[in-house]
Amino acid sequence: MVNRLSKVPLAFEPGTNYLYGLNSDVLGYLIEIVSQKPFDRFLAERIFAPLEMDDTGFFVTKDKLNRLAVTYTPNAHGNLEPIGEKTRELKPGLFIDEAYPYLTGDTYFSGGAGLVSTPNDFARFLQMLLNGGNLKSKDGQQIVKIANQETIEKFLSIRPQDRFKDRPISVGYKYTNGFEVKENYEISTALSSVGSFRGGGLFGTNYFADPEKEMIGIIMSQVYPSIWELADTFETRAYQAEVINEKMNK
C-alpha cells in the first residue's frame, strides 16, 4: 500500500495545510521497518502488554466475541440497524462491515485505524500520557515506563506548521501527531485547559485528556455516521461538573 501511495500526487506541499489521510498508516509501516516487526506485534510488545491493556488489539478472539459491541447505522426510515458482517458501501468509496475484528490472518495493520479496545484499556493509555510516559501496574507493585517525559512532551507539543481543524468545538485546537491539541484558550468555546488533547474514531469513539486538570474522558458509541454532537456535549458536561465540584469544595 505504501509503495502505491508514494505514486499518488500530493494534495499540497506538506506543512502548508491540513488534510485527514493515510499519513499515520505510512508511519505504522515505518515503525515496521525500523523495529523489524509486524506493527501489531510491536504495539503488543511495546505498549499493550506493559500497560496491561489486555483487551486491545486488531482482532477479537473467539472467547471475547460475546463482548464485542454491535455497530449501527441509520436505515431508510431513520432507525438504527446493525451494519452486519456483509460489506456495505455507506457512502461513495466508503465500504464498512462489522466482520473486520473477527477475520484473523489479515496482515494490513493500519497505523491510523482498526484497533479494538475498551474504555478501561484506553484510560490506561491516556493516563500514561498524562503521567509523562509511565504508569503504575494494576497491582500497584511497579511503575511501567513506556517513554521518556521529554518524548511525551514533544509528541504533544504544537509545531509552527500545525493547522487548525474546522469543527466549531475545535476552534483553538491544532492537529499534531494524531491529536487535537489546545493552543488558544481565548478563542475556544471548550472549557479545557491549554495543552489538553483529544481525538476520535470513525464509529464515535471519542476521548479527551487534560494534563492541567488531571482529567480523562472517554465515550465509546458504535454508530456511523458518528454523532459528533454527543462527544462534544459529553466533554462540555464533564467540565461543567468539574467546575461545580471545585466550587462545592471551596
Image (spheres, rainbow, N blue to C red):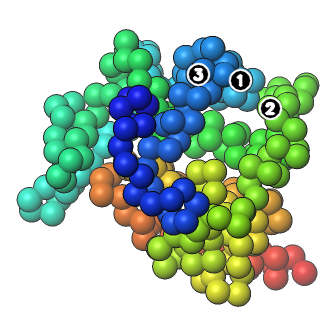
The reply to whether residue 85 is in sight is yes
Element at badge 2? Answer: loop
Residue type for callout 3: Glu
Residue 169 image point, x, y percent: 53, 76
Q: Residue 189 carries which label?
A: none
Contact? badges 2 and 1 (CB < 8 Å): yes
Q: Name the residue under label 1.
A: 46
- At a point 76% along the width and 58% down the height, the residue shown is 157
Q: Where is residue 240 in the image (x, y as percent from the top left)?
A: 66, 77
Residue that appears at 63% across and 51% down? 177
For label 3, count other residues whose C-alpha is less than 10 Å away and answer few (under 14), some (14-19) or many (20+): some
N-terminal of the two: label 3 or label 1? 3
Query: Helix, strand, or loop for circle 3?
Result: helix
Question: Circles 3 and 2: CB distance less than 8 Å?
Answer: no
Q: Which quarter shows the N terminus?
A: top left
Disc 1 residue type (three-letter): Arg
Do the numbered discs 3 and 1 sit on residues whose CB atoms are within 8 Å?
A: no
**Relative horizontal placement of residue 247, taking residue 103 as reference (left or right):** right
3 or 1: mark nearer the eye: 3
Q: Nearer the viewer, mark 3 or mark 2?
A: 3
In the depicted structure, whether residue 249 falls above or below residue 201: below
Q: Distance between the residues labelled 2 and 1?
A: 7 Å
The Cα–Cα distance between marks 3 and 1, rounded to whole angstroms, is 13 Å
Amino acid type, label 2: Ile
- Can residue 55 be seen in this snapshot? no
- Residue tagged by mark 3? 32
Q: Going 63% across and 57% down the picture, which residue do you hit? A: 176
Q: Mark 2 points at which residue?
A: 146
* Earlier residue among tags 2 and 1: 1
Identity of the residue drawn at 50% across and 63% down? 18
**Disc 2 residue crowd, few under 14, some 14–19, many 20+, Cα 10 Å:** some
